[in-house]
Amino acid sequence: MHTRLALLSARILDPVSGTFLPETAMAVSDGRISALGDDRLIRAGADAATTVIDLKGAVVTPGLVDGHSHPVSGAELTHGLDLSGCSDLGQVRETLARGVRELAPGAWLHGWGLDPNAFGDRPVDSAPFDAVLDGVPALLLLFDAHSMVASRRALELAGVDGPRTFDQASAEVVCDAGGRPTGLLLEDAACELVERVAPQPTRGERLDRLAGALRAMAASGLTGAHVMDANGDSLAFLAELDAAGKLPLRLRVAPWCQPGTDADGVRALIEQQGAGGALWRTDGVKIFMDGTIDNGTAWLERPDCHGESTHAFWPDPSVYTRVIGEFHRAGVPTATHAIGDAAVRHVLDAVEEARNGSGTGRAVRHRVEHIETVPDDTLRRFGELDVIASMQPTHCCDFTRADHTDNWSRRLGEERAARAWRCRDLWDAGATVVLGSDWPIAPFPPLGVMAGARHRRPSRDLTQPPHGPEQALTALEALQGMTVNAARAAGEEAAAGRIAVGHRADLTVLADDPLSTAATDLPGLPVLLTVVDGRPAHRDPGI
């Protein structure tokens, strides 16, 4: 068996024990780790065709995997003006004004990452931007990607002049007391009313954006991602990049099952499972049980302070339960977006019903995505039902505040805001906690995600106090959340998530030990090498 890659002079980190293996080198053949040993042994198995890399004491970990990402849609959404750094309306207006000055006559203005906290106590709508966007069609995506602000001109061009009804129960064209749109559009169905009349990038432009985003992910240390969408021609994009040898990450893709999906649609999703290529495959289904707390479309057991977040995404939640049962009997794992406490509870109830009524004995690991606030009595059920807890700690870091003055916390009130992102409690209750970014909602670099799980502070100002420090994970747990646990969530623990002979050669090489690096310093730790399927997907010029 030919050694394609040999890594020498390494410190090889075991993500289970948190200690370094006694071996200092490894050989890779056919995409797998074929040998572990000392430098002399591994070098002896190399030949002229082997890529030999002296790591000079760098640390090798199993490849870091983003447990929740949207690379295709993220590459499309993160173009135009980056509004994520704007903390108040004045800064938003200044950024928009600069964009308008550079805009061609009649062109659309796009922005993304708009934080509702910038609006302070006033409603989220287009009124603060009317002057600067006078006559300009503009779409400003809020940070959660579940809502956007459309300018008056954009609404006019789309013919949106009043309320609409949608299959998605949480979708809404928000209107004032007179029935006139305020500019705020909630959820995909409402946003699409305006998005579809805006100019669209060419297929080539979209493919180039995706390829660039994936290369950047590999350079950040990611070797893979659990992709939570497969809309439009995104699977065709992945297939094209994979066939050309330009897919630098291993991707596990879960297409959406939306409200209104009929029996034929469910059957098609089941039949689609397993389709893919060398580095990507369709595995699982993504479902939404609610929206977001920040825009009032989550499903809470008690309304928020505005009387909102009272409904499920599915108009009839019992239909969701039936669909979960159908996927379970077919052996298809599901990943359900559930942010509010009522949504999380309903998902757990549906999974329990599916497990008890399946009669197949088949082990299917379902997942809950986000889990932003839950009461005590739901925690143990994750472990009992073997439901994966997929969480994004940087959302807590960057979009909420320790003093609960942020929009998310104000909506929930003190009791529920104190239950924010209960990573520690879920871990201690026996849940498999998987960490991710939800990019483009938050930045994708995995070291930043791991750091956020440890310090729970705003990444832009680490001097600020942490939100719920008692919910922090240890350095080892954070690493496990993007290695061992990510593999288990995908049912791949026998082939991935650890460094062992026979396991996949998906590896992340860091300049130093991520376990002994302070949480606040971790995002700056250099990524020297990213190996996917035994091939370097990123290599620092210094090695």
Image (cartoon, helix red, strand yellow):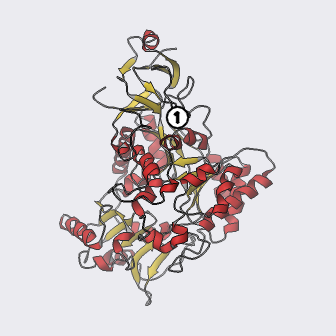
Percent across and percent down for residue 38 are 46, 15
Mark 1 packing: few (<14 Cα in 10 Å), some, or many (20+)? Answer: many
Percent across and percent down for residue 301 are 62, 72
Q: Is residue 534 above or below residue 348?
A: above
Q: Quadrant of residue 195?
A: bottom left
Question: What amino acid is found at the position of numbered circle 1 in the picture?
Answer: Pro
Q: Is residue 163 above or below residue 24?
A: below
Q: Is residue 12 above or below residue 429?
A: above
Percent across and percent down for residue 17 are 55, 33
- Look at 75% across and 58% down and name the residue there: 353
Query: Judging from the image, what secondary structure is the residue with disc 1 in?
Result: loop
- Say which residue label 1 marks: 15
Residue farthest to the bottom, as pictured: 178
Percent across and percent down for residue 86 are 29, 65
Residue farthest to the top, as pictured: 44
309 relative to 141 in the view: left or right: right
Q: Is residue 247 visible to the viewer in this orientation of the structure?
A: no
390 relative to 205 in the view: left or right: right
Q: Quadrant of residue 263?
A: bottom right
- Look at 79% across and 54% down and name the residue there: 356
